[in-house]
Amino acid sequence: MSLLKRLWVSVVVAMGLVLVGAFAVSLMTARGYFEQQLRAQSSDGAVSLALSMSQQTKDAATMELLVTALFDGGHYRSIRFIDSSGKVKIERSQPDQPEDVPGWLVTVLPMDVRPGQAQVSDGWRQIGLVSVEAARGYAYRSLWNGVLQLGSLMLAIGLFWAMGVSALLRWVRQPLAEMAEQAAAIGTGQFRVLAEPKVVELRSVAAALNHMSERVRALFAEQAARIEALRDEGSRDPGTGLLNRACFSGELRRVLADSDAPAVGCVGMLRIADLATLNQHLGRARTDEWLMAVGKAMQASLDGVDDVSLARVGGADFAILLPGQGLDEGRRVFERVQSAIAALDLQTGDAGGLKARAAVMGYRRGEAAGTVLARVDSALMRAESIDALVVNGEGVDIPSPAPGEGAWRELIEGALARREFTLVEYPVLAGDGSLVHREFMLRLPTADGSVMTAGQFMPAAVRVGLASACDLEAVRLGIERLVRSNDPVAINVAPRSLIEPGFLEQLDVLLATAGPAASRIALEVSERGLDANLAGLEALAEVLARHGAQLGIEHFGRQLAALPRLYAIRLAYLKLDGSFVASLHENVGHQRLVKAIVDVARGLGVVVYAEQVHSSEEWATAAWLGVGGMTGPEASRRLAAQG
């Protein structure tokens, strides 16, 4: 029982005791008053009758007439005339049972009415004694009416008193409830500030909670800023703020190894000519300003290009990764970048303007990152020798199975109608090799016997408005897997689906069909497709929470400051982007970043997994840093080794 309820009960009990005591005292006082009145009535009647009988003739008829007249004219229980020898000569009596009065009142409050007596004389001679006892019925009826009136008044007072105490406690409870909600919200990463309550005793508590909320908010902000700084330290070039070589290599390795990344794309390098000469003429500080300006110009020219990675990989070398882009688009992007650099007014003294040489190469998923970079570097040397942009596909273009949006729509809608989609699974293992869950990816078999990955057909599905339908089909297939296995499953959902009308409602219905097994389902959303406001994620979390399902974020690493907000929507886990895991055992900066993320996530109750773990060295380092699970080629090898 809560403290306020105990207080309310104690006040009500005390109030009840006071009212019952007052009621009992009032009844006892009323009964005493009625007893006195009845005794007085009995005594007065006896004296009056004795005087009348003494003054009249003493024949029996006259005396009986006087007794009868008094008995009939008053409220008496009995009247007796007893002669001098003690014999009852005349007696009149009637039952003394009050009407309309409950019997318990007579039992609980008996009235002691002693009869009044007086001597009857004839001159100086005493001839007898009259005994008169007043009837109690009228007194009991008056007492019962008083009980009803007083009881109603006491009940009304008690009800109003209880209502007043309840209102007072509600007035006190409201700020207490708000402070409890504030404390719970702080635990979920929501930092509310409450207005100080009017209850004086609670103001100091509210002020302390507000101070704690602001302090925790500041601590989270400090942690997020520290993580951002560690990310920049390990992933950013200090001179330009762009990605550094290690991070770019990790990103390239990810797109080459991720089966759900686009099957082909472009990667290119751009080199600023005569940077050493410029450095000699202008000095290092001025040259660094130039490089900063070049980086900003390149970033500005890439606005509007989806999923692009821009890095400074050497003193004068810049690299651009364009997953899913064809060579024609790659050529246009690099021509735009070269034009932006050429337009910069960076000439000082005798120094010439900046000139950029560039090469663009196509790649195919599955190639080694070192092979692709070596090919790009060779093409860049050729571009320097001929002073022109070099574009070479090296035969990596994969013909589209359905050219044109209309053909893509027909292909995907037909596959959905015929339920041709399948799932492929990838294990997520804990550091000790035990299974955490199985991650399922959607696949689309084609007429020629090949299988398209999500990286191939999902961009088209997004364009033709069928992304949410594909995601719902993946959830349906995942629920079917739950029937055949007790292993937890994780299913990827496109961020675009979260904001499509009707998706969450249909997902709610699907999860309801899973019943209790829905608690073994986790839905993963890629961080890359989420905006800064995490649109749709909170609504998705509410749907999942209704069914006991979990929410995960994959490819995490860009919106590090969103960690407290992700925790507030009951995030279960996040998967670190593979670019932070690449060569983790060799990259001290990324080790510090991963450790910071793990520490903050652990404090928020969120588990951290690592994506694209390729080697046992990366596995061991991630486990040492506190990562809760790993996925990627190394996880698949270890699961296969377990048999």
Image: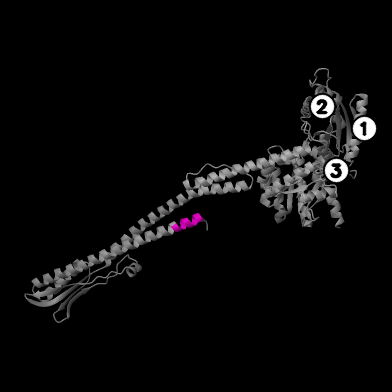
Query: Does residue 344 appear to the left or right of 511 in the view shown?
Result: right
Q: Amino acid at mark 2?
A: Val
Could one spot residue 559 in this view of the protein?
no
**Does the stretch in magenta take in 522?**
no
Toward which corner of the image does residue 142 lie, by quadrant?
Answer: bottom left
Residue at x 50%, y 50% (from the top left corner) = 173
User: Pointer 1: what residue?
Assistant: 378
**Image height check: is 17 above or below 352?**
below
Spot occupied by residue 68 in the image (x, y as percentages of width and height): 17, 71
The residue identified by callout 2 is 337
- Numbered range of the magenta stretch: 3-10
Residue 100 versus residue 333: which sits nearer the camera?
Answer: 333
Q: Distance from label 1 to label 3 (Cα)?
A: 23 Å
Amino acid of disc 1 = Ser
Q: Position of residue 58 (x, y in %)?
A: 9, 75
Q: Write the residue at 89% across / 34% down.
A: 362
Check disc 2 and report its element: helix, strand or loop: helix
Mark 1: few/some/many CA within 10 Å (<14, 14-19, 20+): few
**Foreground residue among 566 and 117:** 566
Marks 1/2: CA–CA distance? 20 Å
Which dot marks residue 257? 3
Judging depth in this view, the residue of 51 and 596 nearest the camera is 596
Q: Earlier in the sequence, mark 1 or mark 2?
A: 2
Task: Locate residue 253 relative to residue 45 in the image: left or right.
Answer: right
SS at circle 1: helix
* Label 1 with label 2: CB-CB less than 8 Å: no
Q: Is residue 6 magenta?
A: yes
Q: Are marks 1 and 3 in contact (CB under 8 Å)?
A: no
Residue 380: x and y in percent read 90, 30
- Of callouts 1 and 3, the N-terminal one: 3
Residue at the far bottom in the pictured view: 85
